Amino acid sequence: MTTTAIEGTATPDEASSPPELSIAARNIAFALIAGGMLLAALDGTIVSTALPTIVGDLGGANHLSWVITAYMLTQTIATALGGKLGDLFGRKRIFLISIVIFVVSSALAGASESMTWLIASRALQGIGGGGLTVTATAMIADIIPLRSRGKYQGAMGAVFGVTTVIGPFLGGLFTDHLSWRWVFYVNVPIAAVILVLAVRMLPASKGDERPVIDYLGIAFISIAAGLTILATTWGGSEYAWTSPTIIGLFAGAVVAAAIFVAVEARAPSPILPLRLFKENVFTVSCLLSFVVGFALMGTMTYLPTFLQFCLGVSATASGARTLPMVISLLIASVVAGNIVSTTGRYKLFPIVGGVVMAIGALLLSRLDESSTFVDTSIAMFVLGIGIGLSMQILVLIVQSTVHYKDLGTATSAVSFFRTMGSTFGAAVMGSVYANSLGDSLPRALAEAKVDPSTVSTPEALDALGDAARSVIRHAYADAFQHVFITAVPLALVAVVLALFLRQVPLRGLAAPAAADVGRGFGMPDTRDTGGQLEDQLTRVLHSTRARGIMERILTVEREVSIPQTWAAAEVGIHRYRHHSDVRLSDLALAHRVPSSVLQSTFDETTAAGLIELEAGAYRLTPAGRASMQHLIAAIHAGLIDEVERQYDTTLDEAQRAAVGAIAWRLLIGSPTLEPIGRHRRASPPPL
């Protein structure tokens, strides 16, 4: 292994790397990044409770689903591109550009005067949102020391996951107490503040690598998805299913998908390597992720509309009444993830989850205008359990079963399928809603002798007499029953798919990620294999499994005690990071202990000849530097052994160097040695 320059002059890479942030500056930078993530995640679901009011104001009920779908489709595309562009031009630059796009599009959406205007604004907003989410994940590696990164990444995942599911409630608050336009306007001042502060306070990150971007792959998968969504949205409403338009859209989607497959087979850096689908666990997990995304976003989009039109609750209350689904989903996903990470047995969860999901969707499909609070809560609670049992473990088992070299791509692929499932869920269920309501509502309006314009919003419907209101609410309930029953056969398909999921031994590296809520909700993560491996090794070394692993790593012959090695390491690390004298008071302050606690250990280390004291400052001796190199070599060799054992593989020279860089950053705790795979440094600087 190449040894490390603990003392002496800075290497060229060090001179050009950004200065290490103080704890306060680091937390401010993290807050800004998390704020961008919050805005992007929130806008995927905050609109759902405002949809009835938006349709009543702008019209275009047949295009209702596109308010959600347009955002999610362009967000998916931007996610696929954003990570690579961040590598090319710098993540801070892409983050700032994404905020600008998000601010402008939010203002345009709030000012919309037609449904077409709103949908176009939402599509633009999705581009900004996708750029924010993917760069936020990557920027954590730029500002957070590797050995501290686990808790920050967990917090980021929680922001993404929880924000995604409380969106309907917040949307209801704005709709009831301000206007549906404030669902979008609220982004403008918040994003503007983040933009101003980010320009000044986020550290710059240079794009040192020239990544290969699969433009053709991204283009054709987007075309295939867009044409399919158009066909399912227009079919039966705008055009007959057998019309040349719908048949042409489906045919175009098939052709685009076929071209995508051909492109991916030849692309030097495909967004979705086809060879991964040879693995049973990966293929089935991707398909199950699609189903989970379909059920989650499809129901979350239309439940608030059902509650407002059929049960007469306010927009705020409709968002709050989805909480049983949110609570059960979070509980089930975390419990399932932790059980799988402990036992290694995962096959039962998607099977049971699919069955429970089908039962929950069936219960939803039996709700009508006379359903009680208990009825709706039970149905949503059951559906949330079903989704949660499957949702969280899919990323976990893929990370724990794919080959080392495919770790980054496979993780991104599972999130991609879940997001595409969400997009199709909103579109398909929206098409079912529009078609069903188009059949039942005109008859109800005729029976109630009510003009259609007088029932365009839930408030207008509530103002009608009891007899007319009952007839029209029944028509809406009938349409929503058709919407929710759509998820039942899909959930049963998930059960069948899960039966074919092979149970294989899980590798332990991914296990500590089980409680990361954001991953289950498909938080984008386009980092390469090195970045993914950094994440997993850091989680492992901060988990309850760390003691046994570190004992195995550090069980090497040594002539000095571990306390003496620690003291020498503290001196070397401090001098490397701060390029200043090392005084005992400084180390005591850094560890928040009295100097007297450390004094005896440092006296022993000085006597052992590892460090020397000169004018009140400590420095490493040649023996101390040798001890440091011995420690780094032990960690390096131990981590290589851990990776090779867990992934049943033999690392090549470049991969071993990558693990060496992880060992070095774990030891010194500095983000200035930039992440593997995106930057020049792949191993510690030589002596």
Image (cartoon, helix red, strand yellow):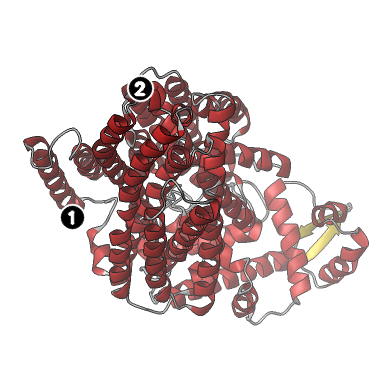
Q: Residue 100: x percent and y percent?
A: 47, 25
Residue in front for this viewpoint, 368 or 28: 368
Q: Secondary structure at mark 1?
A: helix
Q: At 65% from the left edge and 43% from the top edge, which residue is drawn? A: 20
Q: Residue 515: x percent and y percent?
A: 56, 62
Left or right: where 375 falls relative to 215? right
Identify the residue under disc 1.
265
Q: Residues within 10 Å of mark 1 (few under 14, many from 20)?
A: some
N-terminal of the two: label 2 or label 1? 1
Left or right: where 121 falls relative to 606? left
Q: Is residue 223 visible?
A: yes
The C terminus: image quadrant: bottom right
Q: At 11% from the left edge and 45% from the top edge, which residue is drawn? A: 255
Residue 453, label in figure: 2
Q: Quadrant of residue 35?
A: top right
Q: Residue 170: x percent and y percent?
A: 56, 37
Q: Residue 228: x percent and y percent?
A: 20, 43
